[in-house]
Image (cartoon, rainbow, N blue to C red):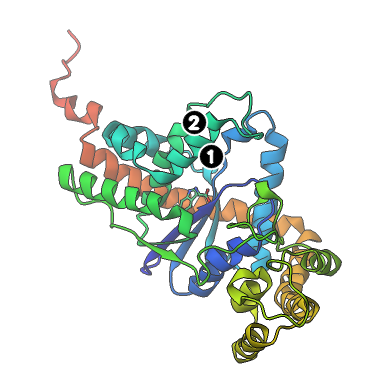
C-alpha cells in the first residue's frame, strides 16, 4: 500500500454527471489524483429510491464510471470502487450505528431537507413511503469515508455537513475505543454551487437544468441557446452580470478571465446582446467538453477496460477495508472466540 495520504469521495449512481459535479468536485479529483491515494466510490447502497429498478442502478454505475474516465481520472492510479463490492461498508455501518446518536443525524441538514421534501410530498416522492435505508445514508457515508481511513474528502458544498458528522464520529470512536481513524478534512471545488441553465439556484438532474459532461456539441449549443439569461432586457440596455447565469458560467469555465471581466464591464455599462455571450459560452464549453467526449468514446468502444477499472479498484479497496475492519474489531474488543478460548473445557475423556 502506498504511503501517500488518502482521499475518499463518492457519488450516487443515479445517472450522467454534469457541469455542476465537475466544477464543484470532479475537477479537484483530477487535480489531486497524483498526490493522494484515491478511492472514488460509486455508492450503490445509497440509491434506495431506485430499489424497484436495479437495471437503472446498474446503468448508473457504468455511466458514472465512464464519466470518471472521461474527465481524466486514471484507474491505474486511483481506485474506482463499487460500494457493494466492498461489503465491509455494510458491516462498518452497522457498528457505527451503535455509536451515532440519532440527534447527530437529526441535526444533519441534508437529511432534514430530504425529510421535509418527502413530508411536503413533491411530485417525485408523492405516494412513496420512506425506506429505512434512507436513515442509513448518512451513517453509510460516514462509513465510506472512514473505511480507507481517508484524510481528505473533496466534495460539493452540499456534502460538507456529512463530513462534519464523519469528523465527530471519528473523534468519538478514537476517544472511546482506540485511535483508528484520521479526522478527515472536506474540500470544496472552485465553484461550490453552479446555477442551473434555467437560473435556478442549483444545477440538478431532478430539475432538468443540467449540461451533462457527455452532451454532444449540438445538445450543448441548444441548451446554451435556450439558457435563462437574466431579467428581460433590450440588447443595448445595461444588465447585472450576477443575475445572468451565462456570465456565471463564463466566470466558471472561460480560461480567459481578463476578457470575461472586460465583457462584464461592457455589459453593465452599455449592455451587450445575450447572443454574444451565449456564442462565447458555447465555444468555451466545447473546448472543455470535447476532450471528455473523445475519451469517453474510446472507453465506450472498449467496455472491458471500464469493467477492469471497476473490478480492480473495488478489489484494491477491499484489501484496505479488511485491514480497517480488523482494527475496528480489535478496538471494539469483538474477538469473542479468541477471548474465551482458554476457558473452553477439554472434552471429557
Ligand atoms: N452522498 C453523496 C451524494 O449524494 C455521495 C456519497 C456517498 C459520498 N458516499 C460518499 C460523497 C462519501 C463523499 C464521501 O453526492
**Residue furthest top as drawn:** 348
Q: Determine the image quadrant of residue 92.
A: top left
Quarter the N terminus occupies: bottom left
Q: Nearer the viewer, residue 120 or 96?
A: 120
Image position, residue 114 (x, y; %): 50, 39
| Residue picked out by circle 1 | 46
Image position, residue 204 (x, y; %): 63, 53
Quarter the C terminus occupies: top left
Asked whether residue 161 appears in the rendered view, the answer is: yes
- Say which label, 2 or 1, has the lower sequence index: 1
* Residue under the image location 52 percent in, 74 percent down: 31
* Residue under the image location 60 percent in, 91 percent down: 258
| Residue picked out by circle 2 | 133
Q: Mark 1 vs ligand 1: CB under 8 Å?
A: yes
Asked whether residue 307 appears in the rendered view, the answer is: no
Q: CA distance from mark 2 to mark 1?
A: 8 Å
- Estimate how packed mark 1 is, as few (under 14), some (14 to 19) or many (20 or more) residues with alpha carbons within 10 Å: many
Image position, residue 96 (x, y; %): 32, 37
Q: Nearer the viewer, residue 306 or 97?
A: 97
Amino acid at each position: 500500500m502506498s504511503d501517500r495520504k488518502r482521499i475518499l469521495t463518492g457519488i450516487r449512481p443515479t445517472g450522467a454527471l454534469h457541469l455542476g459535479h465537475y466544477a464543484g468536485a470532479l475537477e479537484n479529483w483530477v487535480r489531486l489524483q497524483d498526490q493522494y491515494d484515491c478511492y472514488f466510490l460509486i455508492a450503490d447502497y445509497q440509491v434506495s429510491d431506485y430499489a424497484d429498478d436495479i437495471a437503472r442502478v446498474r446503468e448508473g454505475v457504468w455511466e458514472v464510471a465512464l464519466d470518471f474516465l472521461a474527465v481524466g481520472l486514471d484507474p491505474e492510479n486511483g481506485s474506482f470502487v463499487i460500494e457493494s463490492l466492498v461489503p465491509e461498508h455494510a458491516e462498518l455501518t452497522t457498528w457505527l450505528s451503535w455509536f451515532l446518536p440519532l440527534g447527530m443525524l437529526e441535526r444533519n441538514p441534508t437529511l432534514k431537507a430530504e425529510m421535509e421534501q418527502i413530508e411536503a410530498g413533491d411530485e417525485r416522492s408523492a405516494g412513496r413511503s420512506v425506506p429505512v435505508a434512507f436513515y442509513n445514508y448518512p451513517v453509510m457515508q460516514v462509513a465510506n469515508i472512514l473505511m480507507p481511513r481517508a484524510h481528505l474528502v473533496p466534495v460539493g458544498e452540499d456534502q460538507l455537513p456529512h463530513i462534519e458528522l464523519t469528523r465527530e464520529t471519528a473523534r468519538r470512536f478514537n476517544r472511546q475505543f482506540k485511535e483508528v481513524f484520521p479526522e478527515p478534512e472536506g474540500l470544496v471545488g472552485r465553484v461550490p454551487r453552479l446555477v442551473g441553465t434555467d437560473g435556478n439556484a442549483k444545477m440538478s438532474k431532478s430539475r432538468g437544468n443540467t449540461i451533462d459532461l457527455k452532451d454532444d456539441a449540438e445538445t450543448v449549443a441548444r441548451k446554451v441557446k435556450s439558457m435563462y439569461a437574466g431579467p428581460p432586457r433590450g440588447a443595448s440596455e445595461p444588465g447585472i452580470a450576477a443575475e445572468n447565469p451565462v456570465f456565471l458560467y463564463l466566470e466558471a469555465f472561460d480560461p480567459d478571465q481578463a476578457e470575461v471581466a472586460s465583457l462584464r464591464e461592457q455589459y453593465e455599462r452599455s449592455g451587450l446582446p445575450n447572443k454574444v455571450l451565449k456564442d462565447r459560452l458555447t465555444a468555451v464549453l466545447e473546448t472543455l467538453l470535447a476532450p471528455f467526449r473523445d475519451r469517453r468514446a474510446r472507453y465506450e468502444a472498449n467496455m472491458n477496460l471500464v469493467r477492469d477499472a471497476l473490478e480492480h479498484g473495488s478489489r484494491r479497496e477491499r484489501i484496505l477495508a479488511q485491514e480497517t475492519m480488523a482494527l475496528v474489531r480489535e478496538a471494539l474488543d469483538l474477538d469473542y472466540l479468541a477471548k474465551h478460548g482458554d476457558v473452553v473445557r477439554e472434552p471429557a475423556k
